[in-house]
Image (cartoon, grey):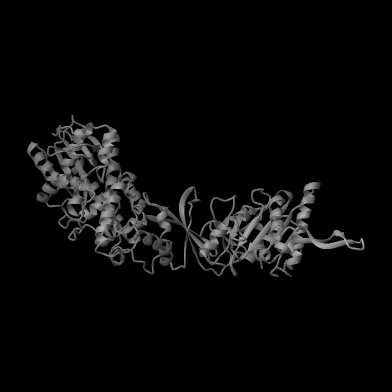
Amino acid sequence: MNTAVNKYSLLSLDEQEELFSNFLIENWSYSAVATFARNEKDFERSYIYREQSRKGPSAIAGSAYHSALQAFFEHLRDTGSELPIADMQEKAYALIDAVQANEWKLGKQTPTVEKIIAKTTSIVNALIENFYKERHIYTDGIARILAVEQKVSTWLVINGVDIPLPFHGTLDLVVELLDGRRIIIDHKSKSAFTDASELGFTGAKQAIGYVDSWETLNPSMPIDEVWYMENKYSANKDKSPQLKKMVITLDADTRRLYEAILYEPLRRMISATSDPDYIYTINDSDTLVDKAELYDFWARTLMVDIDSFNIPESKKPLILRRQKKMRDASTASISPKVITSFRKKAATFISYELRNDMTPQEKIEHTLRSFNISARVAHTLGSFSSVSYLLEIGAGVMIKNIASHALDIANAIDVPSVRVLPTLVMHENRSYLCVEAPHRSNDILLWDAKYLQGSRIPIGLDNFGKPVVWDINNQSTPHMLICGATGSGKSVCIKSTIEYAKLAGIDRIIILDPKYEFVGNMPGCEIITDIADIEARMKSLVEEMQQRAKTGASGKTLIVFDEFADAVSSARSGRELDIREMVQVGYDRNGMPKEELKVVGREKSLEENMKMLLQKGRSLGYRIIAATQRASTKVITGDAKVNFPVQVCFRVPKALDSKVVLDEEGAETLAGRGDGLIKSPEYFGTVRFQGFYKP
């Protein structure tokens, strides 16, 4: 029994933190040592850069089998009775179901997630059935169960050396037998039994770590043996048992031997992780790793930002130093173009090809997986011109990285562009990242009076099927700005909104229409088209508003100003607004009064009158819809947008236009024909919707 005390365990928490700052990792495990000995580059990826490899059916089946055994032995420990096989299967199936689609490692025999799940389930069923038939190999002779799936974390002394990092591990099962012996049992699922002589050496490294950690934490309960209980899921043709117990007996001599076997690769691993300049080499003979995945990882460490990896903040300074040296050395002899080309070539060998039989959801998941982003499309919600894919994001994934792959997603699902929402959306009380993609539909969203609710004028339906509204009685949403290119659905939206406004009780609607778009087809509305008449009407509306303020008169007036940007630029300005009158300037020689035409004042411009109506009219019953094709910062200024709390944008030519209207990109990706975005104090974030069509 190892009773030595590791000197590092006596350090204070601050001293331990200082110690950890010198290493690229903060603990060690048998699996880490085994990975380092097998393939240093795979160790670097898994334990330094914290990237997890995709898993095949055997690996997931092994984890599910462990979950079932944990349930069985916990039930046996707590109740003294055995758990039914159906309950074990239920535990295993739950673990399989929890695996996200992009975590599976597809292969030739299992090219789809559906097939790989079926294969995994088949293996798990065989493992559990084997165990249940031959469980006596486990249970005979057990007096009591000491631990089930117990996580251990402690400082160890290996081969007489104080290891400067704590050991982490999980003990599958620890039991005490009727004869007093204490056994650590490790569950293993196998396609073929391990040779006993080989296990005596390879299993020894794992065994001694488990034994030393248990005895350090439980000094009064030393371990006598370690059992590897192998369960072979492929049926034995000779009908021999499917479970095989491999025993490693521990005495003073074997303990020293096993610690010496473990210490050599452990020492090399500890030394490497304390040296940020250490070069981790790739073992091309390693059959347990996906080489294309590994080489792709190597290429990314030379190219992408450190924030693209799931690295703890405390380790970033060391890894940044390491990356800089690697890149300086590599780019001195290899150009970035060659590295990029190499990465693309490596990626062609990774099993995430986008086949024609894949659904768009599978294509999104597989595309993100190619960039080591774990995500699953949990819900798909569609409207007439767009579809929303709601993504569950894997733990440790930096969401901002997904937005940078928007074009890759669009390419995968064969659309010109997608919009990755800058904020999460809520659906069924859960938050998701939303990716919106355009799609063409022959259906249209017809205008229907049923969508109107009091003063809440519907603008369209979002992808969740809920009305998107403009509440004309809400003092925080008095006016609406609408922008969109030709054919985007802007004018149709205005017509639809006017018809809803009539039903909402607004009987006075004034349309300022310098491009004659609404002439002849909007009965019951006052329509002004000439620019001079528009200026005069706006002036009279301001005077009317001021009179309302004095008299306390009330009433709702809707003013629709179409193409206001062009109207403002065409209206009078500067000296054209001067008010000139004949003014007496003296007397002539005959003593008669002498007059001259002089500027005695200046009229307010169309833009100034509109601004007054926007600012003061909100509390006096005036509601304004201003629409334009041109998203110009000269017209849609910051001050102007303050007066339009509700901002609607249909498809625009450039991302810059979208930013002018909504303060964010996205409208340039819309499909047209009523596919729009709305920003309003009533909604959290920008909402995509399909506008109504009024024949």
Compared across the picture, whether 446 is left or right of 130 comes to right
| Label tally | 0
Q: Is residue 381 above or below residue 167?
A: below
Image quadrant in which the N terminus is located: top left
Residue depicted at x 20% and y 37%: 213
Instruction: Estimate the x, y position of residue 71 in percent, counting from the top left.
Output: 30, 42
Compared across the picture, whether 653 is left or right of 180 comes to right
Q: Quadrant of residue 84?
A: top left
Q: Nearer the viewer, residue 145 or 30?
A: 30
Work out whether residue 352 can be spotted.
yes
Work out whether residue 124 can be spotted.
no
Instruction: Estimate the x, y position of residue 447 in percent, counting from the top left.
Output: 64, 63
Instruction: Estimate the x, y position of residue 600 in percent, counting from the top left.
Output: 79, 58
Q: Quadrant of residue 370?
A: bottom left
As drawn, the residue found furthest toward the front would be 589
Q: Nearer the viewer, residue 641 or 49?
A: 641
Residue depicted at x 36% and y 66%: 354
Q: Quadrant of residue 627?
A: bottom right
Image quadrant in which the C terminus is located: bottom right
Instruction: Estimate the x, y position of residue 116 in percent, counting from the top left.
Output: 31, 59
As drawn, the residue found furthest toward the top would be 220
Compared across the picture, whether 454 is left or right of 309 comes to right
Q: Nearer the viewer, residue 128 or 445?
A: 445
Residue depicted at x 9% and y 50%: 197
As drawn, the residue found furthest toward the left would be 253
